[in-house]
Amino acid sequence: MDLRGEMASELNSLDNDLALAAQQLSTIGIHGGAAPVLQNIYNQHNSVVDVATIDPEGYLITIQPDRYKSSEGSGSTNSSFMR
C-alpha cells in the first residue's frame, strides 16, 4: 500500500472510532465515565496526541492520556494545547 493509501486507511479508522466514541459518550455523557472511551481512542491510534471532551462553554472536561489531566477544567480557547 502506498503512503496515500496508508494515510487514508488510518484516517478512516480514526473516523470510525471517533463516531463510535461519540455514540458511547452520547449515552454516558462527557463527565465521569468518558475517560475509558477517550483512552481507547488514544491507545488505538498512534497519531493521536490527546483526546478530550469539551463542554458547550469551551471548558475541557475530560482528557486522556492522564499526563494532561492538569488541563481539565480549563477554558479551551485560553489553553496552550489549543493554539
Image (cartoon, rainbow, N blue to C red):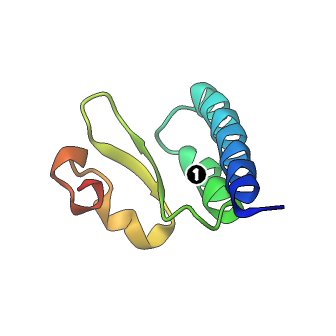
Image position, residue 9 (x, y; %): 75, 50
In the visual, does 20 lie left or right of 68?
right
- Residue at the spot x=51%, y=66% of the render? 65
- Whole-percent x and y of residue 28? 60, 32
**Which secondary structure lies at badge 1?**
helix
- Relative to 64, is 27 on the left or the right? right
Q: Residue furthest bottom?
A: 67
Image quarter hosting the N terminus: bottom right
Question: x%, y% of residue 34?
Answer: 55, 45
**Image label count:** 1
Residue 4 picture location, percent across and down: 69, 55
Q: In the figure, residue 22 lies in which quadrant? A: top right
Q: Residue furthest right?
A: 1
Kind of residue at disc 1: Leu
Is 10 displayed left or right of 75 in the figure?
right
* Residue at (21, 56) in percent of width and height: 79
Relative to 52, is 73 on the left or the right?
A: left
Is residue 2 positioned above or below 34 on the image? below
* Outermost residue to the left: 78
| Camera-side residue of 22 and 47 | 47
- Which residue is denoted by mark 1 in the rendering? 38
* Depicted 19 relative to depicted 63: above or below: above
* Residue shown at the point (66%, 28%) measured from the top left: 23
